[in-house]
Image (cartoon, rainbow, N blue to C red):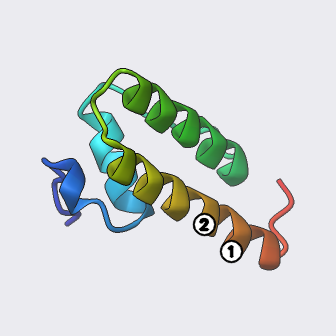
Amino acid sequence: MAKRVTDVGQIENLMDIQQYLKRFGTFIYTKNRIGDLHMMAEEVRTLYEAGILDIREYQKARHILRSEEIRLQKEGYSK
């Protein structure tokens, strides 16, 4: 069972970002994994601009999302 992310400080990986976004009613799944990552990055940016995330939390989430995108690209994900 996935842990429930109740605080942005608990974000450590991609699944945690998804769980955190669900708190705000944001569910992202389009069958395009890289597209999903871009949409999540946009949602994280929106939360930062709204003052919900501080700069460190925002940077950490963006780093996780970017790292996942790079990993997928290295593995040859093309969709």
Gap between marks 1 and 2 measured at Cα: 5 Å
Q: Amino acid at mark 1?
A: Arg
Give the total number of marks visible in the rendering.
2
Q: Residue placed farthest to the top in the image?
A: 50
Disc 1 packing (10 Å; few <14; some 14–19; many ≥20): few
Q: Which mark is residue 34?
A: none
Q: Which residue is mark 2?
A: 68
**Whole-percent x and y of residue 76?**
85, 73
Horizontal arrangement in the rendering, residue 30 relative to residue 48 (left or right): right
Horizontal arrangement in the rendering, residue 79 relative to residue 14 (left or right): right
Which secondary structure, mark 1?
A: helix
Disc 2 packing (10 Å; few <14; some 14–19; many ≥20): some
Q: Which mark is residue 71?
A: 1
**Whole-percent x and y of residue 67?**
61, 68
**Whole-percent x and y of residue 22?**
30, 36
**Whole-percent x and y of residue 23?**
23, 34
Q: Amino acid at mark 2?
A: Glu
Q: Residue placed farthest to the bottom in the image?
A: 75
Q: Is residue 71 above or below residue 49?
A: below
The residue at the point 86 percent across, 60 percent down is 78
Which secondary structure, mark 2?
A: helix
Tag 1 and tag 2, C-beta contact below 8 Å: yes
